[in-house]
Image: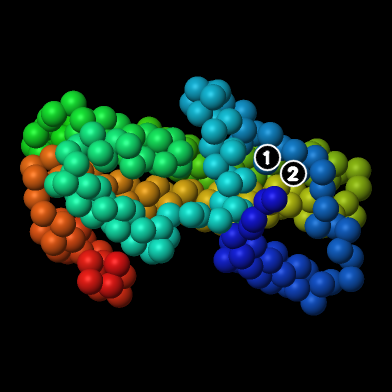
Amino acid sequence: MFVISFSTIFGIIIGMSLFLYSVVSSTDNYIMFISISSLLLVVGGTLAATMIAYQGKYVFQSVIALISILGPFNVNAKKIFGDVGRIIEFSNVAKTQGVLGVEKMLNEKEKKDPLMFFGVNLLTSGYNGKDVRMMLEDTVESTFQREMVRADILNSMAGFCPAFGMIGTLIGLVIMFEKMGSDISAIGRGMALALLTTLYGVLITQLFLKPASEKVRQRLEIYRFRNLLIMEGLAMIADGKDSLTIQDRLNSYMDPKIRFKIAQG
């Protein structure tokens, strides 16, 4: 079952509604705002330029990321709170059963979490806290940089899109001026059609590509923050810190409203 992000859908609906209202409140000739050729030039040209600028697989991943913003993002305050609680559970088990006991605690979901699984493997390998922190930090940052490519590509697409809108406008103007001598009445209609590609380019950029780029970037930064918490917690377990010390350290990163309390845990 596909679950949607209501805030994203709400924003798209509001943006499109304002655009449609400005059209229907200003003219009865709605059909003049529809041009399949102009839309194809803007969308197709943007994809073509992006494919030239970047490797194809990354462009495909970026398009998937553009669609994915319609779905929910599961790394929220509740999820982070639960992860902190889980790290504290790990620290208690590590004190009583050793780090091998932590490995046995991992559930199926945690085994599929690359950072959590890798971090627990480092614990069981006997690395100290400094080494665990160094290797997990490298993992977190390299993962963040790889995933940020999608946001960067979407941002580049936001730059290409209005440019192809202008190209379409120039094509329309050339055609319009070529017909000026034979049919002067066609100038107005030709100018309106020429400007449609610019309209499409700006609308797609401002309502879809730029917001999608920023939302992907924000989600990745939240996920990075969550991963840094896990990194710090596992590094402190490797150093043999007690659960209260780990709690206070992780709470120093968190919003006061969602700080973990062992007494209430």
Residue found at the far front of this picture: 96
The amino acid type found where label 1 is placed reads Val
Q: Which one is nearer the viewer's eye here, 25 or 249?
A: 249
The amino acid type found where label 2 is placed reads Leu
Residue at mark 1: 43
The spot of residue 77 in percent (x, y) is 38, 64
Residue ID at (59%, 53%): 71
Within-10-Å neighbours for mark 1: few <14, some 14–19, many 20+: some
Q: Mark on residue 147?
A: none
Q: Quadrant of the C terminus?
A: bottom left
Q: Is residue 49 visible?
A: no
- Residue 23 occupies quadrant: bottom right
Within-10-Å neighbours for mark 2: few <14, some 14–19, many 20+: many
Residue ID at (13%, 40%): 238
Q: Which one is nearer the viewer's eye here, 118 or 123?
A: 123
Count numbered badges in the picture. Answer: 2
- Callout 1 touching callout 2 (CB < 8 Å): yes
Depicted 157 relative to depicted 127: above or below: below
